[in-house]
Amino acid sequence: MARKKFIAGNWKMNTTLEEAVALAKGVADAVGKQSDVDVAVCPPYISLSAVAEAVKGSNVKLGAQDVHWEAKGAFTGKVSCAMLKSVGVTYVIIGHSEQRQYFGETDETVNKKIKAALAAGLLPIVCVGETLDERKGGKMDAVIERQTRGAFVDISAGDAAKCTIAYEPVWAIGTGETATPQQANEAHIFIRNILTQLYGKETADGLRIQYGGSMKPDNAKELLAQSDVDGGLIGGAALKAGDFAGIVQPK
Ligand code: PEP
């Protein structure tokens, strides 16, 4: 099945309001007219509205970096799905390794967030991936399987089909280390097999699996040429419009 590639930029805790608007305009100018690849940018919460305005009329969609599962109330510092919808967000990253590593994200909270996002009409980008210790200790498959199955507990095939998975080996995030195209593809095929067990071949074949981990213009082409690499979740290289565009349209 032909899956349209999907490249999303995760700006993490970078960019002031002014910088975010400038970067968003740069991305929209560079790749906002093409429609061969789905493109999204995920700025910090405080810049979502302004970035929505900056990419208006282009094919660049807006994503958020996280969301809380509760609808409203006494949850200081948190942002709900309805709030994200109200400023024009389409996608939401859920379960990023930095959330898991530093902020207590678990497979259970990932699952709650995915359910809340889907109920609100947001499209989750669900992150899974092993640490270096887990890989070296031969636990890679078990970790990826636990995270993938945990994310999709009690989620129907119809809802799962609205999700994107991002395979992000933690050891390759922000380190300059990249999984080889073969390593990435093997992990993607492993994840797709789990999705096939959960939802059947048709749904699993339709789901997009992005690779994330030091993807750059000069390694994007080979990674994206793999059979099961359907796009990228980009950190560092998403902070320069030219680099990000070079991944959307690699030479
Ligand atoms: C990420 O954190 O999602 C990521 C892939 O970061 P980087 O591209 O900087 O490795």
Image: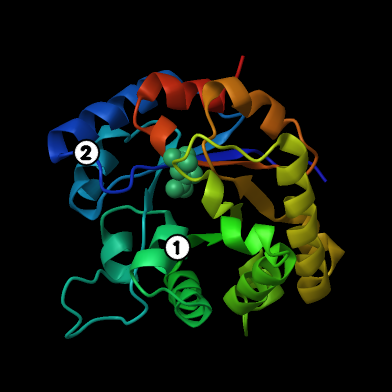
| Residue 163 can be seen, yes or no | no
Q: Looking at the picture, how far across and down is residue 93, in whole percent?
A: 44, 58
Q: Looking at the picture, how far across and down is residue 144, in whole percent?
A: 66, 66
What residue appears at the point 65 percent right and 41 percent down from the top-left corner? 179
**Label 2: which secondary element:** loop
Say above or below: 4 vs 104. Answer: above
Label 2 crowd bin: few (<14), some (14–19), many (20+), radius 10 Å: some
**Label 1: which secondary element:** loop
Amino acid type, callout 1: Leu
Amino acid type, callout 2: Thr
What residue appears at the point 37 percent right and 78 percent down from the top-left corner? 69
Say above or below: 11 vs 45. Answer: above
> Is 180 left or right of 119, judged from the image as shown?
right
What residue appears at the point 70 percent right and 56 percent down from the top-left corner? 207
How far, Cα to Cα, is label 2 from label 1?
A: 24 Å
Q: Which residue is mark 1?
A: 122
The quadrant where residue 75 appears? bottom left
Q: Looking at the picture, how far across and down is residue 132, in whole percent?
A: 58, 55
Say the numbered circle drawn on residue 15: 2
Instruction: Depth check: give the residue in front, 83 or 145.
Output: 145
